[in-house]
Amino acid sequence: MTTLVTLLDIACGRPIPSFESGPSRRLQLVVFALLASLIFAGTWGLAAGSQATGLAIANLYKVPMVVLLSCAFAAPAGLLAWRLSGAPTRGSDLALGFSGGVFGGTLVFAVLAPLVALYYHSSAWAGPVLGIGSAILALVTGTVMFVRGTMRRLPPGTSKLAVLLPVTVTLGMQLLTLIQLAAIAAPIFPEPTPFSGGIDHLAR
């Protein structure tokens, strides 16, 4: 329970208690945040595909896989940009902000999963709209939490523009990979969506 509260504090950009700020504990929190995110993503995937048993079961691993791989692609690019930019913040702070954003975004998935399942079973129109809308809301929430959490952990007196490059690179890399990974993993929803065809479909 203490770890969960700490992860919520990280996602909201609150200061970490001194006893939680050691290097090993920070790494542990990053890992816990990502593992919890995979569970949240699987819960939402189950709800989004609940109209068909096969799709629901497949989504239990497809949606977490999309989240995990997008993080794996984005994190190295963000850390490289952080190193090259000389931003006056610790790499662990950037990692905590990123994992906190992913945790917060997928937490939105978990919270909205029952509503997504309910409307998919009771409304032919609202189900798909709510499914896509919840995915977009989770993405926006995760982005805001990542940016806010990273900015709030800057040393006092440091310009917020100092971490703009690594944050932008991380977000851009994750968005670009999410679009294609979602297309590779399709179908996630019972019906075709604008994201089912990846960047080619969006460009058309």
Image (tube, rainbow, N blue to C red):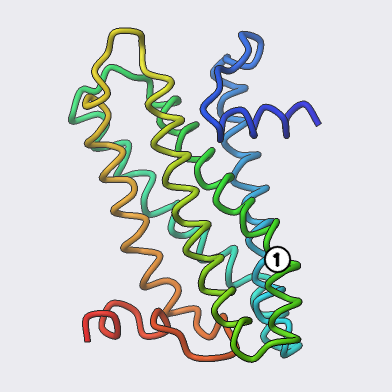
Q: Locate the C terminus and report the quarter of the image it occupies.
A: bottom left
Q: Is residue 85 left or right of residue 17?
A: left
Work out whether 27 lies above or below 127. above
Nearest to the observer: residue 155 or residue 83: 155
Q: Type of residue at label 1? A: Ala
Where is residue 51? Give x, y as percent.
72, 88
- Residue 103's x, y, as percent? 58, 45
Query: Residue 179: where, in percent of width, then height?
Result: 37, 70
Q: Residue at x 50, y 31 (%)?
A: 96
| Number of residues whose C-alpha sits closer than 10 Å to that of mark 1, classed few (under 14), some (14–19) or many (20 or more) | many
Q: Is residue 143 left or right of residue 58?
A: left
Q: Residue at x 67, y 85 (%)?
A: 55
Tell me the quarter of the picture where residue 184 sits. Answer: bottom left
Q: According to the image, label 1 marks what residue?
A: 113
Secondary structure category for the residue under label 1: helix
Residue at x-position 28% and y-position 77%? 199
Q: Which residue is depicted at the point 45% across and 33% down?
A: 95
User: x%, y% of residue 180?
Assistant: 36, 73
Q: Quadrant of the N terminus?
A: top right
